[in-house]
Image: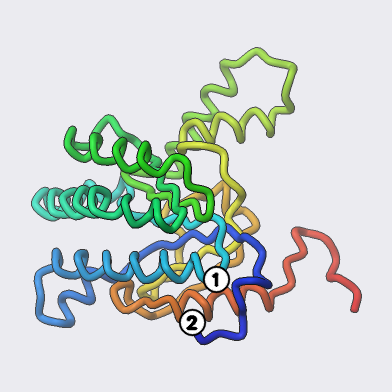
Amino acid sequence: MIQSALHAEILPKPHVAIIMDGSGRWALAHGLPRSEGHRAGVEAVRRVIAGALELGVGTLTLHSFSSGNWQRPPEEVARLFGIFEDFLFEEPSLWIERGIRATVFGRRDRLPASLLETIEYAENATSGCQRLHLRLAIDYSARQAILRAAEQLAAADSNVETPEARFERLLAEAGGETVPEVDLLIRTGGEQRLSDFMLWESAYAELYFTSVLWPDFTAEDLADALKEFHARDRRFGALATAV
């Protein structure tokens, strides 16, 4: 049980997005290969998923592999994809028990065939689950998704929707599917930037930065971030609520 002033029953169903940063530095600090940091990061993912369920999170989006990460050494990219494949193959039976629906968004045309098959397996196996929507961004770039949606909007001929509504629908098609806007965006590892992650959907997100390296991030750390989130006054451009 997470020891927190927040109880799952009083939480709304926020959309929490996390930039999982610091796995490589964690490995170097422990005298290990970078790949071991990524494997340790998988355990953090498991802890945070369990914490998200207990804390009443509705959507959990994890930045797993950005389009910019292709610049890393090919052997590291291959190991990452192997880790993704193992994770997505091993977890669905547990996710089904817990009511977790898993989806992956980002480009799929550059991913290995075996990883694509495993993604489809995980998505199909958990498609009926409704307690938590777990979203993994793999080969994802917010700028590229926005550009593709803008190009489709410019070429469209429709008076049925407002431009913004149509753009958001096209953006969802580029990024996977329509989901609630991000309420809380967490970045671990001490860096304080968005790194081309869900730029449109995070327009009014509360930002939370922590120096904790991702493999050390726990469900309690997630609870602390949510506690601060709920203490903030979200005005969305309006005046503060009178008290």
Q: In the drawing, what numbered circle is on residue 55?
A: 1
Q: Amino acid at mark 1?
A: Leu
Q: In the rendered view, does 66 fall on the left or right side of 178?
A: left
Instruction: State the colouring used for the structure image.
Output: rainbow
Residue 233: x and y in percent read 74, 72
Mark 2 crowdedness (10 Å alpha carbons): few <14, some 14-19, many ≥20: some
Which of these two is toward me, 71 or 124?
A: 124
Mark 1 or mark 2, which is nearer the start of the sequence?
2
The residue to which callout 2 is attached is: 2
**Can you tell which quarter of the image residue 87 is in?**
bottom left
> How far, Cα to Cα, is label 2 from label 1?
8 Å
Quarter of the image where the C terminus is located:
bottom right
Name the residue located 49 percent from the left edge and 59 percent from the top edge.
17
Q: Amino acid at mark 2?
A: Ile
Q: Are marks 2 and 1 in contact (CB under 8 Å)?
A: yes
Which of these two is toward me, 184 or 3?
A: 3
